[in-house]
């Protein structure tokens, strides 16, 4: 009995100690190397402990919030991934997925870093259904538009088919009146034209294709902004998010963008800054040349809780955009078709704005006329992108 009591006391002490870690050091919200939101320490409750949710989140928080953890993980992966991945025998990767580090794959010997398709779990399906239920209420409340982008998370390249046919599922279960368009691919070669080799985001060509489809969905194709130049930065070797996470630097690519001439506009970024992105500096040769630089975020603009674009088109509508980092590349292009455009990243809104995002109140306070939701599969299943619908 004594030994059991000692174990129980030690366990309680450890739990309480971990709960207080957040007060000892400042918790990090985002891993810039891994390009994801970090798990924070949650307050201990007996209910969450009995349900097992506390232990699960505690394990993730210990990994994410460990002092120096991000640096240590990078260094360990850098040491472990010493193999020259460019020399993989063709028999191992020809028309096959080849696991490189446990998380990322290459396919068909093309020296790309991709993820393999997911399985649609009960939890993921429940999250999608919950999200679609809220969206259906939004459809009855305001003129709503949806743009869905397909990613390798839902596509089986070996079979050339969608492993999770989420587009049909959305159309079948989303209620009310709405507008819908999507970025799709039929095989690996089509996918490679639209996305980076080493980063999960769409590239300059894929993002621009998405913009044109969205403009057409808004029935405003006549005002599409066309690129004036294609620019490749010769002194940049681009290592995208997947390279930075895995520390696999054998696969690399150039950084190429379209250059546009935008009409005059103003920006308010998180109510603090009047800039978003660094296009002008890049075109002047002013940019970081470190191999760990997130050029996608640096060039187009990073993930912000709220960015407001004002193109002073007083005869046009105001638009609310809900999305993730995918919107960064096309925010200004979309905003050029409207008067004011409010772009919200729900992962960061409460942190920078000091309050939860209330979509109905936000629409009313900012005279929003239309809502655009830009989503991929992870957007639909990630709880960070939840929106509440107040009664």
Image: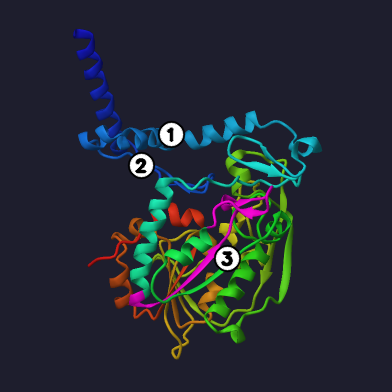
Circle 2 crowding by C-alpha within 10 Å: few under 14, some 14–19, many from 20? some
How many numbered marks have been drawn onto this rendered protein structure? Answer: 3
Circle 3 crowding by C-alpha within 10 Å: few under 14, some 14–19, many from 20? many
Residue 63: assigned label: 1
Q: Are marks 1 and 2 in contact (CB under 8 Å)?
A: no
Q: Quadrant of the N terminus?
A: top left
Q: Tag 3 or tag 1, which sits nearer the N-term? A: 1
Q: Residue at the location (68% across, 53% down)?
A: 160
Using the rendered view, name the quadrant where residue 82 is placed: top right
Element under disc 3: helix
Residue 108 x/y as whole percent? 75, 45
Residue 135 x/y as whole percent? 38, 67
Q: Residue at the location (51% across, 80% down)?
A: 265
Circle 1 crowding by C-alpha within 10 Å: few under 14, some 14–19, many from 20? some
Q: Are marks 1 and 3 in contact (CB under 8 Å)?
A: no
Residue 194 on the magenta span: no
The magenta segment? 140-165
Element under disc 2: loop
Which residue is labeled 2 in the image?
Answer: 40
Q: Is residue 8 left or right of residue 174?
A: left
């Amino acid at each position: 009995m004594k030994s059991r009591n000692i174990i129980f006391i030690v366990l309680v002490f450890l739990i309480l100690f971990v709960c207080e870690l957040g007060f000892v050091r400042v918790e990090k919200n985002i891993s810039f190397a891994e390009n994801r939101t970090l798990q924070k320490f949650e307050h201990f409750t007996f209910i969450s402990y009995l349900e097992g949710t506390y232990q699960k989140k505690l394990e993730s928080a210990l990994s994410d919030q460990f002092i120096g953890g991000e640096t240590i993980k990078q260094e360990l992966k850098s040491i472990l991934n010493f193999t020259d991945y460019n020399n993989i025998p063709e028999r191992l990767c020809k028309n096959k997925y080849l696991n490189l580090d446990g998380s990322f794959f290459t396919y068909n010997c093309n020296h790309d870093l991709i993820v393999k398709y997911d399985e649609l779990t009960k939890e993921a399906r429940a999250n999608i259904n919950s999200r679609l239920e809220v969206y259906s209420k939004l459809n009855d409340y305001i003129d709503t538009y949806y743009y869905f982008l397909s990613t390798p998370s839902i596509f089986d390249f070996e079979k050339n088919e969608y492993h999770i046919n989420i587009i049909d599922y959305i159309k079948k279960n989303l209620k009310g009146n709405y507008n819908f368009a999507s970025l799709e691919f039929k095989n690996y070669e089509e996918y490679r034209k639209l996305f980076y080799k080493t980063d999960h985001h769409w590239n300059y060509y894929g993002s621009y294709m998405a913009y044109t489809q969205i403009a057409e969905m808004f029935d405003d194709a006549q005002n599409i902004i066309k690129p004036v130049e294609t620019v490749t930065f010769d002194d940049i070797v681009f290592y995208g998010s997947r390279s930075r996470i895995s520390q696999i630097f054998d696969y690399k690519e150039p950084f190429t963008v379209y250059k546009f001439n935008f009409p005059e506009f103003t920006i308010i970024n998180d109510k603090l800054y009047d800039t978003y992105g660094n296009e002008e500096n890049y075109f002047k040769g002013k940019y970081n040349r470190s191999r760990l630089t997130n050029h996608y975020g640096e060039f187009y603009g990073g993930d912000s809780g709220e960015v407001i674009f004002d193109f002073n088109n007083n005869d046009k509508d105001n638009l609310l955009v809900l999305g993730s980092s995918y919107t960064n590349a096309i925010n200004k292009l979309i905003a050029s078709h409207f008067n004011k455009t409010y772009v919200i990243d729900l992962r960061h809104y409460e942190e920078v704005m000091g309050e939860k995002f209330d979509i109905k109140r936000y629409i009313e306070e900012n005279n929003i006329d239309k809502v655009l939701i830009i989503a991929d599969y992870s957007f639909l299943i990630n709880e960070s992108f939840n929106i509440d619908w107040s009664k």
